[in-house]
Amino acid sequence: MPNSLLTPHEQLYLHELLSFKNTCALKSSIIQAIVTDHQLKDLFNKDMALTKRQLQELQGILSAQN
């Protein structure tokens, strides 16, 4: 992403997205703990790995704005 500053509205939107992704990650980790099917558990593991990378990227963008 270029070194341009985000508008306050864009920052708010990214905060909302970050919050939503955190909620999704929490829900996935809870469901993953009770799933017994190995293929479904593997899908949840892949989803969690992707979500963690996305959360780090969003946090990086927001921290660069401060």
Image (cartoon, rainbow, N blue to C red):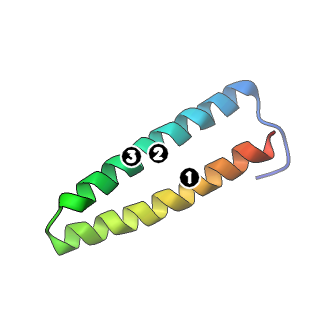
Q: Is residue 63 above or below residue 56?
A: above
Instruction: Identify the residue at image location x=19%, y=74%.
Output: 38
Quarter holding residue 13: top right
- CB under 8 Å between discs 3 and 2: yes
Measure the C-alpha gap from mark 2 to mark 1.
Answer: 8 Å
Instruction: Identify the residue at image location x=26%, y=60%.
Output: 32
Instruction: Name which of mark 2 and mark 1 comes first in the sequence.
Output: 2
- Along the horizontal axis of the image, is 51 left or right of 64? left
Where is residue 65? Give x, y as percent. Answer: 79, 41
> Amino acid under label 1?
Leu
Quarter holding residue 14: top right
Q: Where does label 1 land, which residue? A: 55
Q: Secondary structure at mark 3?
A: helix
Q: Where does label 2 land, which residue? A: 22
Q: Where does label 3 land, which residue? A: 24
- CB under 8 Å between discs 2 and 1: yes
